[in-house]
Image (cartoon, rainbow, N blue to C red):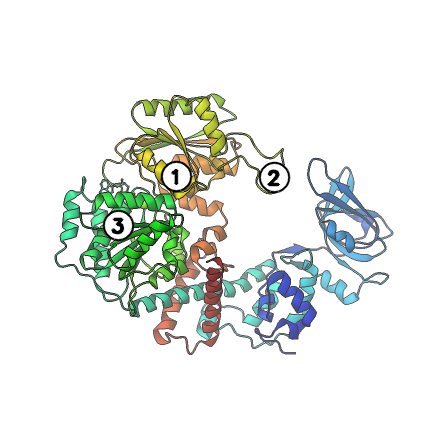
Amino acid sequence: MNYQLNTSLSIALGAKTAQALKKSFDMHTVEDLLRHFPRRYAKRGELTPMDSLQIDENVTVMAQIQSIKKRSMQKKRGGILEVEVTDGSGFLTLTFFNQDWRERDLRPGRMGLFSGKITAYRSKRQLAHPTYLLAPDNEDLDPEAVETFARPLISVYPATSTMPTWRIEKMITLLLEGLSESIDDGLSPEIVSQYSFFSLYESFQKIHRPTTLEEVEAAKQRFVFLEALQYQLILLRNRLRYSEANAKPIDATSDSLLRTFDSQLPFTLTEGQVQVCNEIFADLAKPHPMHRLLQGEVGSGKTLCAIRSMLRVIEGGGQTALLAPTEVLAWQHFRSIQALVPEGITVTLLTGSMKAASVRHALESIADGSSNIVVGTHSLIQERVEFRNLELVIVDEQHRFGVEQRAALAAKAPSGLRPHVLVMTATPIPRTVAMTVFGDLDISILQELPQGRKQIDTFVVDMNEKPHHVERAWNRILEEVSKGFQAYVVCPKISPKLKEGENEENSDTSLNDVENILQYLSHGPLKSLRLAPLHGKMTSDEKEQTMRAFQAKEIDVLISTTVIEVGVDVSTATVMVIMNADNFGISQLHQLRGRVGRGEHPGLCLLMTTADADSTSRQRLDAVASTLDGFKLSEVDLEQRREGNVLGSQQSGFKSGLRLLRVLRDEFIIDSARTWAQSILDTDPELLNHKELRMSILALENQSEAEFLEKA
Ligand code: ADP
Ligand code: MG
C-alpha cells in the first residue's frame, strides 16, 4: 500500500465503497476524500460509568441499547427518536431530532459507545445527538475501535444519511494508514520553510487525527496558502495572456464624436470621470486588450465613462457592446444612450424576450457592422450573435457575470484580435476581495458623486412597534407625488403564491408581494394615484412600456420587485418604500435606494420591517440607515454573511468557490501568495517545472469551465 493523491478510490477502498463515495460526494481519488475535512471536532471524555454522570459534562459511555421510541413533535414537522441505553449501573436517554433513519442502526440489544454532552430534560439526564460507534449485532465492540473512539478529539465529517460521519472516518483511517509519505502539492521548499508548514503528509494526518485544535489550525495553513496561490496563479496567468493577446489599438486623433458629445452634455464631467476616462483611453491605445474594472459608488456616473469610451472606439471604426444584468436595465441604457449620443450613431437593443422579427433585424445590423453600439442582456453571449468588428465590451454591474461570461464575449472579436473589456460595478469591494475575484483586472475607482447630488435620508419603520408610521409612509408618497415627483414601492415577491414546501400557516397574506400591495394601495391609501406593477414575470414589451410610462410621468408609483435594483435612473423619483426590507441583503438595499435622490431633489428611503429590534436582520437595516458609504456597508455585509456567498461561483466564476481561504481574515496570505505566484511565473510562465501546481490549477479551471457549460 502506497497511496498517491491520484490513486483511485476503487483501488484504495474497493469498488463498492468507491461507488458510494462517488454517489454521495462525487469523489474519485484519494485526494478527494482526504480533502473532505472535518466539519468540526467533538471533544470526548474518558469512559464514564452511568451512575456518575454530571450535567454539562462531555462523556463517553459504553452501553447496551434497551429500547427505542419514536415521538412526533408538537406543532413542528419531524419526530424525535428516544433511545434508552444502560450499562448495568444506570440508564440514560439518547435523543435525535428529525433523524428517523438512525432507527435502522440503533436496534435494541446492540452494544455501543455513545459520546456527547450531558443535559437535563424534565429532570432526566440525556445525551442529545451523541456521536456513536455500534458493535455488530450480538457482538462486543472491537477493542481497537474502542481505542480510536476514545481519542481526545473526534473528527465530525460533513455527512449524508447514507454516508454517516463514522463511516467516512473509518475510510479516511484506511487511507491515512496507506498514504505515501512522499505526496506533494507543489509548494516549493522555500515556501514551506518560510511559513513553517507541515509536510503535506503530516498536514493530512493532523487535520484528520488531531490531538489539539491548535494543531488543526496549523496544519490547515498549508491548504489555505495553496488555495490562495492557485487562485493567484490562475489570475496572473490570465493577465499574462491578455497582455500577450492582440487588440486593435485605438487612438482617435480627431476625437470629433467625443467632442460633440461632451459639448452637448447638460453638465460638466467630474474630475473623477475625466481621470477614469483617461486611464481607459490609455489602455485602449495599446495593441493589447484592456481588462479594467471600474468601481464607483451608486450614482457616480459610470455610464458616462462607458459612453465616452465607446465613442472613442466608434470614431476609430469599431463596434461596441454594453452588457447589462437585467432587461429593464438593458432597455434603460438603450434609451438613455440613444438620447445622448451624437446623430448618426446606431444603437441596437438585443434581449432574450424580444420578438423574433426584431431579433433578426438586430442580428443583421450587428453582423453587417451598421450597428455601432449594441446594448443587451446575457443573450449577447449567445453563439448566433456575430459582430462584424467588436472592439470594446462593457459589462455593467458586473456582480452577476462570471469570469467565463466575460471570456465568451471576448471571443466574439474579429479573428486574431480580442476586444478591450471594461467591467463596471457599484459594489464596493475590499482590497483583498478585489485581488481574489478581480485579480486579473486593472482597477479604476470613481470616488466622488456629481455636484449637486442630494442626500438620501433612510429610515427604518418598525411595523410592529409603530404601526401608525406605516400610514405616514403612504402619506409621504402622496406628498411627493403632489409636488410632481414619483415613487417606488419594492416588494420581495411577485405574488402571494406559496413557495414550495410552505404550508398554509406559514404563507403570509401580509404586504409582501407585488400583487397584494398593488391591490391594497390602489383601493386604499394611494387610490388617488396612478400605480403600476413591474416585475420579472412580465414580458419585455410590458416592462419596456411600463418603464417608458414611468419616465414620462404617466405613472406615479411603481410597485416592483428588485428588477429595479441596479442602475434604473429616473431622476424625478424621490421616495422609495421597501416592504419587508429585512428580506434583502445590505448591498441590495444600498443599490435599491440608489434609485432615488438621483436628480437635484433629496431622496427618501423607508425600510419597512417586522423584524425584532435586536435581531441581526434589524441590525442590517440600521446599518443601511446609518450611512450612505457603500464601502462601510460592504464591510458590515462581509462580516454578517458567510464569505462563501460573497465569493460564490457566480461572482468569482470558480465553481468550487473558496474552500478554506477567507478574504478578510487571510489578507496577509493573499498578499504573499500573489507575490509568490508572480515570482513563479516570472521564471516559469507555463509552469513546466511546476507539475503539481500546473495540474491542480488546470483541474480548477476545467471544473469552472464545465460548470459554465452546464449552466449555458
Ligand atoms: P452609476 O454610476 O450608478 O451607473 P449613472 O451613470 O447611472 O450612475 O449616473 C447617474 C446619474 O448621474 C445619471 O442621471 C447621469 O446622467 C448623471 N450624471 C453623470 N455624470 C454627471 C455629472 N458629471 N454631473 C451631473 N450629473 C451626472
Ligand atoms: Mg449604472
User: Residue at (48%, 25%) from the top-left corner?
Assistant: 520
Task: Tell me residue 689's x, y (percent).
Answer: 42, 78
Q: Earlier in the sequence, mark 3 or mark 2?
A: 3
Q: Residues within 10 Å of mark 2 (few under 14, many from 20)?
A: few
Q: CA distance from mark 3 to mark 2?
A: 46 Å
Numbered marks: total: 3
701 sits left or right of 566 in the view: right
Residue type at numbered disc 2: Glu
- Dividing the image into four quarters, tell me where ligand 1 lies: top left
Residue type at numbered disc 1: Glu
Q: Tell me whether circle 3 and circle 2 mark residues in contact (CB < 8 Å).
A: no
Q: In the drawing, what numbered circle is on residue 303? A: none
Nearer to us in this view, 587 or 620: 587
Q: Residues within 10 Å of mark 3 (few under 14, many from 20)?
A: many
| Residue under label 2 | 502
User: Residue at (57%, 59%) from the top-left corner?
Assistant: 214
Q: CA distance from mark 2 to mark 1?
A: 30 Å
Q: CA distance from mark 1 to mark 3?
A: 21 Å
Instruction: Assign a secondary structure to mark 3.
Output: strand
Instruction: Assign a secondary structure to mark 2.
Output: loop
Tell me the quarter of the picture where residue 250 sits. bottom left
Q: Judge: label 3 CB < 8 Å from ligand 1.
A: no
Task: Tell me residue 35's x, y (percent).
Answer: 57, 65
User: Residue at (18%, 50%) from the top-left corner?
Assistant: 344
Instruction: Assign a secondary structure to mark 1.
Output: helix
Residue type at numbered disc 3: Val
Q: In the drawing, what numbered circle is on residue 542? A: 1
Q: Earlier in the sequence, mark 2 or mark 1?
A: 2
Task: Tell me residue 669's x, y (percent).
Answer: 44, 61
Q: Tell me whether circle 2 and circle 1 mark residues in contact (CB < 8 Å).
A: no
Q: In the drawing, what numbered circle is on residue 347? A: 3
